[in-house]
């Protein structure tokens, strides 16, 4: 976790989180929904550095404002991971949150396009194996790069210099980034097929790095390191 200067510590912040979000439901089966509730918990603060009103979620919330959450300026993920969305009903730019502390908006995104979070949901991570295939053209055609059980900070370094217009996730959960070094807009890739960039939430077919979502530790500078 990140060491913080000023504001509350994570333990102190948790003390003030005494409001729990009424349950929202998505298109999940009953067993999956119960598993996510048991393993997912996120605390949202209205001010930076874990100050101000705090509210907790353990289920998907398609519209934070309708739930009484007007502004999110810092976040503590007690268990997860989670994905946040710029717009209500799980639309717009995506933000991936893994277990740890996020004292201000630029600790969870480097895109600098938006500091707004309007919806949140837990991410189901149910596979220890990871395999993803990214294609140059829509509908899984053209040149491709296949990645198995690895993180790739730069496609160019691996000899792939094409755009990414469609994606097939065979196992695991991944996050793709607009730029090398895990920077820029983020796109969540859960198991399944994405026939064009709009299906994985990107306005343009620009994905230049990708990593697995696993049990990771958040580094202060925004890098991710494997846990021992």
Image (spheres, helix red, strand yellow):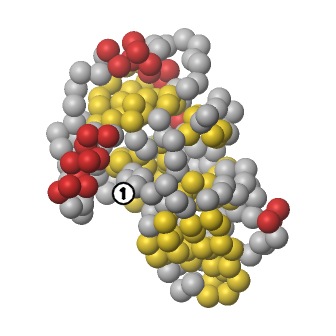
Q: 110 or 138, which lies in front?
A: 138
Query: Residue under circle 1?
Result: 90
Give the mark count. Answer: 1
Give the side of residue 179 with respect to residue 124, left or right: right
Q: Residues within 10 Å of mark 1 (few under 14, many from 20)?
A: many
Quadrant containing the C terminus is top right
User: Is residue 46 something that shows in the picture?
Assistant: no
Q: Say if 171 sits above or below 110 in the image.
A: below
Q: Say if 69 sits above or below 131 in the image.
A: above
Residue 23 position, x and y percent, is 18, 44
Quadrant containing the N terminus is top right
Residue at image position (57%, 54%) is: 212
Residue at image position (59%, 36%) is: 227
**Element type where label 1 sits in the image:** loop
Q: 179 or 46, which lies in front?
A: 179
Give the side of residue 24 with respect to residue 158, left or right: left
Q: Say if 176 sits above or below 225 in the image.
A: below
Q: 130 or 167, which lies in front?
A: 130
Residue 43 position, x and y percent, is 36, 30
Residue 28 position, x and y percent, is 24, 60
Residue 88 position, x and y percent, is 34, 53
Quarter location, residue 151: bottom right
Give the side of residue 228 with respect to residue 208, left or right: left
Give the side of residue 175 with respect to residue 99, left or right: right
User: Is residue 82 something that shows in the picture?
Assistant: yes
């Amino acid at each position: 976790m990140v060491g913080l200067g000023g504001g509350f510590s994570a333990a102190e912040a948790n003390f003030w989180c005494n409001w729990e979000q009424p349950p929202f439901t998505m298109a999940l089966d009953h067993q999956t929904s119960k598993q996510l509730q048991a393993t997912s918990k996120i605390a949202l603060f209205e001010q930076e550095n874990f100050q101000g009103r705090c509210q907790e979620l353990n289920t998907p919330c398609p519209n934070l404002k309708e739930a009484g959450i007007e502004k999110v300026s810092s976040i503590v993920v007690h268990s997860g991971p989670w994905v946040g969305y710029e717009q209500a009903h799980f639309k717009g730019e995506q933000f991936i949150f893994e277990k740890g502390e996020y004292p201000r908006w630029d600790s969870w995104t480097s895109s600098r396009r938006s500091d707004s979070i309007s919806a949140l949901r837990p991410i189901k991570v149910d596979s220890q194996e990871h395999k993803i295939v990214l294609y140059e053209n829509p509908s899984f055609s053209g040149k491709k790069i296949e990645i198995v059980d690895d993180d790739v900070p730069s496609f160019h370094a691996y000899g792939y210099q094409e755009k990414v217009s469609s994606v097939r996730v065979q196992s695991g959960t991944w996050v793709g980034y607009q730029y090398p070094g895990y920077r820029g807009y983020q796109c969540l890739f859960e198991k399944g097929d994405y026939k064009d960039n709009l299906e994985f939430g990107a306005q343009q077919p620009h994905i230049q790095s990708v990593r697995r979502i696993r049990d990771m530790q958040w580094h202060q500078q925004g890098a991710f390191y494997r846990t021992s």
